[in-house]
Image (spheres, coloured by chain):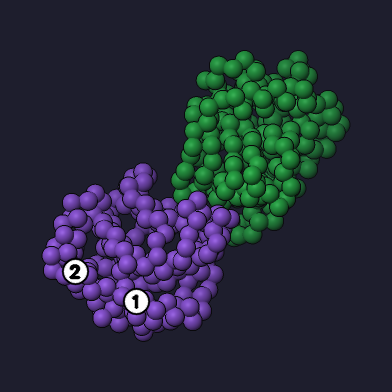
Amino acid sequence: MGINKAYMRTDLLHDVRKAFTISNPQSIQLHAFLADDALKKVKTAVNKLSFTRNYVPDLHCYDEAKRIPKELRSVFAEITALVQFIAKKKLKCKELTIRKFGKKQYTVLHDAYKEKPGVDVMLDLTPAWHPAAGGAMVYTRKGSGVLTIAPAYNTFSIVQRTKSMMRFVKYVNHHAENKRVLILGTFR
Amino acid sequence: MSKAILDEWVSPKYLDYPAVRKLKRKYRQQRPFPHHALPGFFRVDKIRKVRKALLKQDFKRKEADLFSFWQTPQDIRHVKNPTLRSFYRLFNSKEFKQYVGWLTSTKLSQKLDMSGFVYSDGDYLLPHDDRLESRKVAFVVNISHGFKKRDGGSLGMFTTRESHPFRMTKQYVPQFNTLFLFTVTRKSFHQVNEVQANKQRVSFAGWFHGN
């Protein structure tokens, strides 16, 4: 079992689904998401990965994993069922990537990033984080911020990204003591 | 060129015709894109008063994907402080626009935008080219004190490859009383490096417009 057992309780799942449905934009954050064993396995696997630098100065700067480890794929089988239940529709994970954002790294809002709408998921493996260091995932609607997801270890976020929404990762400044590690997926 | 307002504000070395003509010639050859970096540009007594007046203004926190800094809530043209109004009048004068237009070989119109900025610890402006509507010549008046390269806050300029900024090949450390001018084009990619010290990078910035 990869996901924390508490999130498998039917009563809690219904509460989570309700909270997701009534929020605007539709979103939820689940803390202490992976069970200890699964978290350890995923973290160890991610730590072993090689990353490549993606840098186009007016668009983005981040490090991206060259592959997705099998330990993560097996957890994502469970995650798919959970996301389908919460979003109340049949979905498939269409995109999955692992990115690290260290000092001086970011993404910006740009036409080049016009993504097809979908249900975004984000598993945060960021260790302790300085609150003034930046690095938040910010969702915007017509240019205005509508949701900010700050770094939080072992937290799983689900966001229904509509056609009018875009997202960016806020510049990480010199106060950062670690890199923000994000597993990012989109379900459609 | 009527010089009264220029004489009042601009250091004599930048009004000496042979010297300024040399500067004008250098503009197009500057890399990675045409620009002027003019240290000691304004008369020191005047610019000191302007700095003092600017720092008494209210600033509004501005945060977006591209930037993080403090900005005057309205364009300097609306500010009531007499020193700042007088500084704005210089920039908005026919004489100064003629001077800037001549130095940059650009035809300018009446329109001018000007705001005050403070970048504090952790603030930055990511790479962009400034292109919007009728902007022709961008300017920055740096009035920061005590910056060293390691403190950040430098104005960085990029080469361009395939319509994107590619490599930062020039950096100007914030230096009190320096005027920067550059023509806004598809290649004028620049940024303000993150301030990495407990210091304030203080400046005016904006655009001279054209038709």
Image location (x, y in percent) of residue A137: 40, 56
A7 or B106: nearer the viewer:
A7
* Residue at figure coordinates x 55%, y 50% from the top left: B126
Q: In this view of the protein, which residue sits in the foreground, B44 or B87? A: B44
Chain B's colour?
green
- Which residue is under mark 2? A84
* Left or right: A92, with B123 as reference point: left
Counting from the top left corner in percent of width and height, residue A70 is at: 36, 84
Spatial CA span between label 2 and label 1:
24 Å
Q: Which residue is at a point 52% across and 20% down the rendered structure image?
A: B78
- In this rendering, the label closer to the viewer, 2 or 1: 1
Residue that badge 1 annotates: A36
Question: Is residue A120 something that shows in the picture?
Answer: no
Can residue B44 be seen? yes
Name, please, the residue furthest toward the bottom.
Answer: A70
Which chain is mark 1 on?
Answer: A
What secondary structure is marked by label 1? helix
Circle 1: residue type: Asp
Q: State the image coordinates of residue A75 (x, y, percent, origin top left).
A: 30, 78
CB contact under 8 Å: marks 2 and 1: no
Residue B105 or residue A48, whichever sits in front:
A48
Above/below status of B46 relative to A15: above
As shown in the figure, which amino acid type bears the numbered disc 2? Answer: Gln
What residue is rendered at 24% in x and 77% in y? A78
Q: Give the SS element for disc 2.
A: helix
Q: Quadrant of residue B99?
A: top right
Q: Chain of mark 2?
A: A
Count the labels in the image: 2
Identify the image quadrant of residue A20: bottom left
Q: Colour of chain A?
A: purple
Residue at the location (47% across, 53% down)? A131
